[in-house]
């Protein structure tokens, strides 16, 4: 004979799981009455005559639902409910506590012990069935939640595996990007060049470098691609190819003299060429700032173009700081943009510093940014430090005043020091 649950919907028997219900009562007659109703409704029924016996049954079969009398010798229903909740199981067990009319005042105690619902004896079959259906809905929702959690756990595990692969690739990408700055220091005799590059994440959009031109000239450049991350790093790598000292025939900063010797292009012309390349050939959404300087190592004469990059600084031999540059548009914003050059003289003992905006925009100890004035204070305190140690000390100082665990933006710099 079909159960009442299946009669209303012929497909219900194939859709709904058969719930196992444990009936706990020290009165055998009461157990048989409840068990008979449950069996008629299609439940898989097991019985126990005491709390201790019920616990043993729960450990063996893990019933979906429990209907337990409150008043039982030895372990009563409330104690059994507490012990039931302590059992280790994967899914949830729905617990209904049976009370007599005189025990209604103790319903709160039963619910606090872990019971989900309660019924008053003698049982009303209609009410019992309604409470069981409510319990089944809760168990179904809990099963769906568990299934979703399992799916999320699998998805999370997959994402973690992918993230590990991405992190591994980014570590290698960082190594490759750092390799773009092959030399962090070179002594040219009359002058020395030092470089620093510290991406904010695994990879960044900053690039610094120098291009020797003959014996007494060097081109310095600093690039900061808007944003930071993989796309910025890819653009930085491509730009490095246009300014590579190891491939002078492809270097946009170089041209050929009458006898084929490499010559430095005027900085404003280099900026215009890079602007055309970005807008016409690369066709990317990124733009970048640039500071590029041609330095005569013998005379100390410098010709510089500033395309949106922070103003370079001259730190004189006596420690004074002077800003240089004419501002200008970043590279890759407007077609046919023009750029202006500035010229100045470095005296013996002077040094030229070209730093990214990650330096001045480094968070300070009191919630603000370091700013240009703060940078000048830091550099004044480091006026006696020479060579690569100056840039290293600058980054260490920024790390000390930065309240965050990491820098929010890439930090890069290049420095030319004229010998005494």
Image (cartoon, helix red, strand yellow):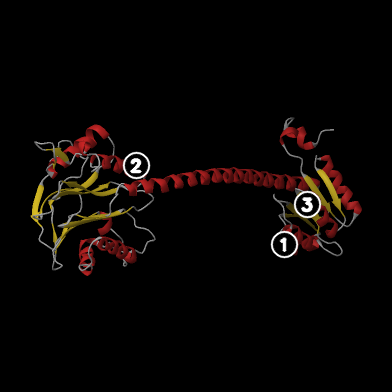
Task: Say which quadrant the C terminus sits in.
Answer: bottom left
Can residue 123 be seen by looking at this rendering?
no
| Label whose residue precedes the other's in the sequence (2 or 1) | 1
Q: CA distance from mark 2 to mark 3?
A: 59 Å
Report x, y in % for residue 367: 32, 64
Looking at the image, which residue is at 28% across and 51% down? 183
Q: Is residue 128 above or below residue 418?
A: above
Label 1 Cα crowd, 10 Å radius (few <14 / some 14-19 / many 20+): some
Q: CA distance from mark 2 to mark 1?
A: 58 Å
Q: Is residue 36 above or below residue 312?
A: above
Check disc 3 and report the residue beneath it: 66
Q: Point out which mark residue 231 bears.
A: 2
| Label whose residue precedes the other's in the sequence (3 or 1) | 3
Looking at the image, which residue is at 79% across and 54% down? 59
Specify whether 263 is left or right of 96.
Answer: left
Task: Say which quadrant the N terminus sits in.
Answer: top right
Report x, y in % for residue 60: 81, 51
Q: Secondary structure at mark 1?
A: loop
Nearest to the observer: residue 190 or residue 347: 190
Q: Which mark's residue is nearer the viewer, 2 or 1?
A: 2
| Label whose residue precedes the other's in the sequence (2 or 3) | 3
Badge 2 vs badge 1, beta-carbon distance below 8 Å: no
Report x, y in % for residue 266: 11, 43
Q: Secondary structure at mark 3?
A: strand
Badge 2 vs badge 3, beta-carbon distance below 8 Å: no
Check disc 1 and report the residue beneath it: 113
Nearest to the observer: residue 11 or residue 384: 384
Nearest to the observer: residue 283 or residue 16: 283
Specify whether 409 is left or right of 342.
Answer: right
Looking at the image, which residue is at 28% across and 36% down? 284
């Amino acid at each position: 004979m079909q159960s009442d649950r299946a009669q209303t919907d012929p497909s219900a028997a194939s859709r709904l799981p058969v719930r196992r219900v444990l009936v706990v009562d020290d009165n055998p007659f009461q157990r048989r009455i409840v068990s008979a109703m449950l069996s008629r409704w299609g439940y898989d029924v097991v019985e126990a005559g005491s709390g201790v016996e019920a616990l043993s049954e729960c450990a063996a079969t893990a019933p979906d639902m429990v209907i337990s009398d409150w008043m039982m010798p030895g372990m009563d229903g409330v104690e059994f409910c507490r012990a039931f909740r302590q059992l280790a199981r994967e899914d949830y067990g729905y617990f209904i506590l049976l009370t007599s009319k005189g025990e209604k005042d103790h319903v709160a105690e039963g619910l606090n012990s872990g019971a989900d619902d309660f019924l008053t004896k003698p049982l009303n079959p209609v009410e019992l069935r309604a409470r069981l259906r409510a319990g089944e809905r809760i168990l179904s929702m809990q099963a769906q939640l568990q299934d979703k959690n399992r799916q999320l756990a699998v998805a999370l595990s997959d994402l973690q595996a992918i993230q590990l692969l991405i992190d591994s690739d980014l570590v290698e990408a960082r190594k490759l990007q750092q390799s773009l700055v092959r030399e962090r220091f070179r002594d040219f005799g009359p002058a020395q060049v030092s470089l620093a590059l510290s991406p904010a994440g695994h990879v960044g959009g900053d690039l610094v470098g120098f291009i020797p031109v003959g014996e007494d000239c060097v081109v310095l450049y600093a690039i900061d691609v808007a944003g930071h991350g993989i796309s910025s790093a890819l653009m930085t790598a491509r730009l490095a190819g246009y300014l590579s000292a190891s491939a002078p025939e492809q270097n946009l900063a170089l041209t050929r003299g009458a006898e084929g010797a490499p010559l430095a292009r005027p900085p404003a012309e280099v900026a215009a060429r890079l602007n055309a390349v970005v807008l016409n050939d690369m066709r990317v959404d990124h733009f970048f700032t640039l500071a590029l300087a041609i330095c005569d190592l013998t005379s100390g004469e410098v010709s510089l173009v500033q395309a949106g990059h922070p103003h370079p600084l001259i730190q004189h031999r006596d420690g004074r700081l002077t800003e240089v540059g004419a501002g200008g548009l970043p590279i890759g914003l407007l077609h046919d943009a023009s750029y202006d050059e500035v010229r100045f003289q470095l005296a013996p003992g002077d040094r030229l510093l070209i730093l990214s905006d990650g330096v001045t925009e480094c968070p300070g100890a009191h919630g603000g940014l370091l700013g240009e004035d703060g940078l000048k204070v830091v550099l004044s305190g480091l006026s006696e430090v020479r060579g690569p140690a100056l840039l290293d000390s600058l980054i260490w100082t920024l790390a000390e005043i930065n309240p965050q665990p990491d820098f929010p933006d890439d930090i890069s710099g290049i420095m030319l020091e004229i010998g005494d």
